Image (spheres, grey):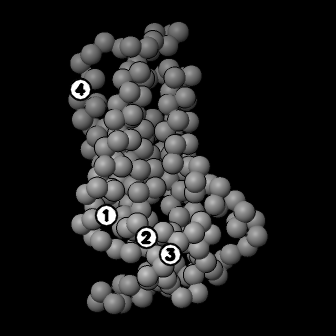
Amino acid sequence: MLNTLQNIDRSIFIFFNRDIANPLFDFIMPILTRGTTWILPLVIMGYLYWRRKHGNALVIMAASIILIGLSDLISVRLLKPLFDRARPCNPDALVEGGRFLVGNLRSLSFPSSHAFNSAAFAAYFTYFLPHRKKLLFGIAILIGFTRIYVGVHYPFDVAGGWISGSFLGFLYAALIAIIIRPRKKLFYTPNGN
């Protein structure tokens, strides 16, 4: 069973990493995969601050900064050592036929921290901005895709990051909502809502 899952994971990896490869993606994906770690939270915090439609925008933004540390801590320090899975680009376990556009990394692979963190942010901010759900999760999906395309994660690493990150994000948002619900609004919109 485990071998079957690993073979499926490798086949999907080869499809997204090699079979759909093209010069445009080869140029864009390494840039996106390096730059997206902070883009999602910064864009959302900027949006919240600019629009100030949510009465507790400042608290929500401040809490998201704590989420950055928490999600990275859980994915890198807790989950990766627990699963101890080598990356497809690890020089000791290279996937035959793979393309490794950002080098060979020896760090652990499961779950993808980029996918975990971006899904945690998407879930967290979706809780407070449900009308932006498609955009937020669309960005998280793009971030995960870049990790497979450049050859640093298997698809199951990314899927595991999305699932566990989303769970953390929704759980954390629910906790923050309980904390801020009884408090006064910090920001008011011009019409008082």
Spatial CA span between label 4 and label 1: 30 Å
Ranked by sequence position, the earlier of labels 2 and 3 is: 3
Nearer the observer, 188 or 140: 140
Give residue 89's mark.
3
Q: CA distance from mark 3 to mark 1?
A: 16 Å
**Residue marked by disc 2:** 106
Residue 115 visible in the picture: yes
Name the mark nearer the viewer: 2 or 3: 2
Q: CA distance from mark 2 to mark 3?
A: 8 Å
x, y (%) of residue 43? Answer: 56, 36
Question: Residue 61: image x %, image y %?
Answer: 42, 28
Q: Nearer the viewer, mark 3 or mark 4?
A: 3
Whether the residues at callouts 3 and 1 have beta carbons within 8 Å, the answer is no
| Residue sitting at x 46%, y 55% | 114
**Eye-nearest disc, 1 or 2:** 2
Work out whether residue 18 or residue 94 is closer to the camera in this orientation and state it.
Answer: 94
Q: Which residue is mark 4?
A: 179
On the image, the x and y values in percent for residue 52 come to 50, 20
Please report the residue visible at 58 percent of the width from the left and 54 percent of the height from the top: 34
Earlier in the chain: of badge 3 and badge 1, it is: 1
Q: Secondary structure at mark 4?
A: helix
How far apart are the two marked residues, 3 and 4, measured between alpha carbons?
43 Å
Write down the residue under mark 1: 80
What amino acid is labelled 3 in the image? Cys
Quadrant (top left, top right, bottom left, bottom right) of the C terminus: top left
Label 2 amino acid? Arg
Q: Are marks 1 and 2 in contact (CB under 8 Å)?
A: no
Q: Looking at the image, how many numbered discs can be counted on the residues?
A: 4
Q: From the viewer's perspective, is residue 59 above or below residue 113?
A: above
Classed neighbour count for the residue bearing mark 4: other residues with Cα under 10 Å, few (<14), some (14–19), many (≥20)? few
